[in-house]
Amino acid sequence: MEPVASASWFWVLLPFGLAAAWWAWADGTGYTQRKAMQRMDEKKAARRERAMEALGQLDPNKKKGKR
């Protein structure tokens, strides 16, 4: 208990400050939005591929990008 009780408040609050700085940077540069859009695009592509396979219009053995 003693090492925690004698810890400086700086070290206790540092992770929260770093998290706030990361959040501000990620939102300010558009990183968060780009990642969200990337995840949506991946889900959309997977959904489209499943639909095409269900319709029988896509060969499941065929690799994407090779025509």
Image (spheres, rainbow, N blue to C red):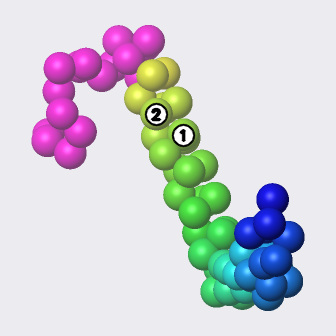
| Magenta span of residues | 52-67
* Mark 1, residue position: 43
Question: Residue at 45% of width from left, 22% of height from top?
Answer: 50
Label 1, secondary structure: give it: helix
Residue 15 in which image quadrant: bottom right
Q: Position of residue 45 (x, y in %)?
A: 46, 40
Residue 14 in which image quadrant: bottom right
* Mark 2, residue position: 46
Q: Looking at numbered disc 2 in the image, what kind of residue is underneath it?
A: Ala
Question: Residue at 14% of width from left, 41% of height from top?
Answer: 66
Q: Confirm or deny contact between disc 1 and disc 2 (CB under 8 A).
A: yes
Q: Is residue 23 left or right of residue 38?
A: right
In front of the other: 33 or 66: 33
Quadrant showing the N terminus: bottom right
- Residue 64 visible to an observer of this rendering: yes
Spatial CA distance of label 1 from label 2 is: 5 Å
Compared to 66, does 14 lie above or below?
A: below
